[in-house]
């Protein structure tokens, strides 16, 4: 990861650890049960959760595997993940500070790698996917979920500009087909790719989670009022109760090494 983006990620998420611990999008969300059902974790597996944030995915899988290492670039997030694991009595969860693009683990050392709602922060996504593949055992499973955007390039750029204005550590959200191509190029055979999962967000809570200034909130609302037509089905904006509600698209992809 570039040093500049690393420090942005640490700054943004270090200050937001508590809000991500309680965020319903991250702590719950439709993708979590789909991910668990499609991965089919086994009791003897050793698992790694990359970009764990407050640890919600690691904690989901912990009761179903032998060990989970929850890794993240941000120490405050790791502390929150360890706190939540202890609160739930999950003794098989360990935390480890790690850069997703240079994982400090041996080749072929995990049965499962998960990465949920973190990939859009990685500036070198193909390097991160190569690392996922490297640390997986032959036949090992990648359980992945992230936001996705439309395939039209100009509309996708507008989408990512919107996200980056809210969160400077945001790098890029890709169309679903691009993600699947990245996995295939790294030797990860896609076995499951979900339909689009829509999640609705309330604007103020979404913006406040990343401490957005009032000036930038005004800019974000103006961007939402002037969407490219291709993004209307994705964002599906609606104004109600004095605030904006809008949607994001998310997918679950499960792939196997070799």
Image (tube, rainbow, N blue to C red):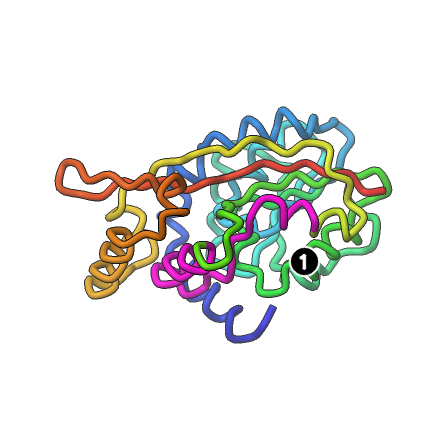
User: Looking at the picture, does residue 57 appear above or below residue 53?
Assistant: above
Name the side, left or right, on which 183 lies relative to 52.
right
32 and 71: which one is in front? Answer: 32
Verify whether residue 247 appears in magenta: no
Q: Residues within 10 Å of mark 1 (few under 14, many from 20)?
A: many
Residue 161 location, quadrant: bottom left
Q: Can residue 22 be seen in this snapshot?
A: no
Instruction: Judge by depth and name the residue closer to the eye, 111 or 169.
Output: 169
Q: Position of residue 72 (x, y in %)?
A: 57, 55
Q: Residue at x 61, y 52 (%)?
A: 71
Q: Residue furthest left?
A: 242
- Find residue 208 and report its horizontal and vertical position in percent: 28, 53
Q: Quadrant of the C terminus?
A: top right
Q: Position of residue 231 (x, y in %)?
A: 39, 47
The quarter of the rendered structure image containing the N terminus is: bottom right
The answer to whether residue 247 shows anywhere in this view is: yes
Q: Say which residue label 1 marks.
A: 128
> Under tag 1, what secondary structure?
helix
- Is residue 157 left or right of 251 when viewed as pictured? left
Q: Residue placed at 58% from the left, 34% from the top? A: 90
Q: Residue furthest front?
A: 229
- In percent of width and height, residue 57 lies at 56, 38
Q: How many marks?
A: 1
Q: Is residue 137 left or right of residue 65?
A: right
Which residue occupies 50% across, 45% down?
A: 147
In magenta segment, residue 179: yes
Image quarter of residue 176: top right
Query: What's the magenta bit mostly, secondary-structure-wise?
Result: helix
Report the span colored magenta. 156-181
Identity of the residue drawn at 34% across and 59% down: 166
């Amino acid at each position: 990861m570039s040093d500049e983006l690393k420090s942005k990620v640490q700054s943004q998420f270090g200050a937001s650890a508590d809000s991500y611990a309680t965020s319903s999008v991250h702590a719950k969300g439709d993708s979590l049960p789909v991910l668990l059902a499609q991965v089919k974790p086994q009791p003897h597996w050793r698992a790694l959760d990359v970009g764990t944030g407050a640890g919600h995915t690691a904690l989901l899988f912990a009761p179903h595997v032998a060990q989970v290492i929850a890794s993240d670039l941000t120490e405050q997030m790791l502390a929150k993940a360890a706190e939540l694991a202890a609160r739930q009595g999950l003794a098989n969860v360990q935390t480890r500070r790690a850069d997703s693009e240079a994982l400090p683990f041996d080749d072929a050392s995990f049965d499962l790698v998960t990465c949920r709602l973190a990939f859009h922060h990685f500036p070198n996504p193909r390097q991160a996917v190569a690392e996922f593949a490297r640390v997986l055992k032959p036949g090992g499973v990648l359980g992945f979920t992230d936001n996705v955007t439309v395939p039209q390039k100009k509309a996708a750029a507008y989408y990512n500009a919107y996200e980056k204005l809210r969160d400077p550590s945001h790098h890029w959200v890709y169309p679903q087909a691009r993600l699947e191509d990245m996995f295939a190029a790294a030797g990860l055979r896609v076995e499951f790719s979900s339909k689009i999962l829509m999640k609705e967000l309330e604007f103020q809570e979404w913006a406040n989670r990343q401490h957005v200034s009032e000036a930038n909130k005004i800019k974000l609302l103006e961007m939402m009022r002037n969407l490219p037509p291709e993004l209307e089905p994705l964002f599906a904006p609606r104004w109600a109760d004095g605030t904006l509600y809008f949607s994001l698209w998310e997918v679950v992809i499960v792939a196997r090494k070799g």
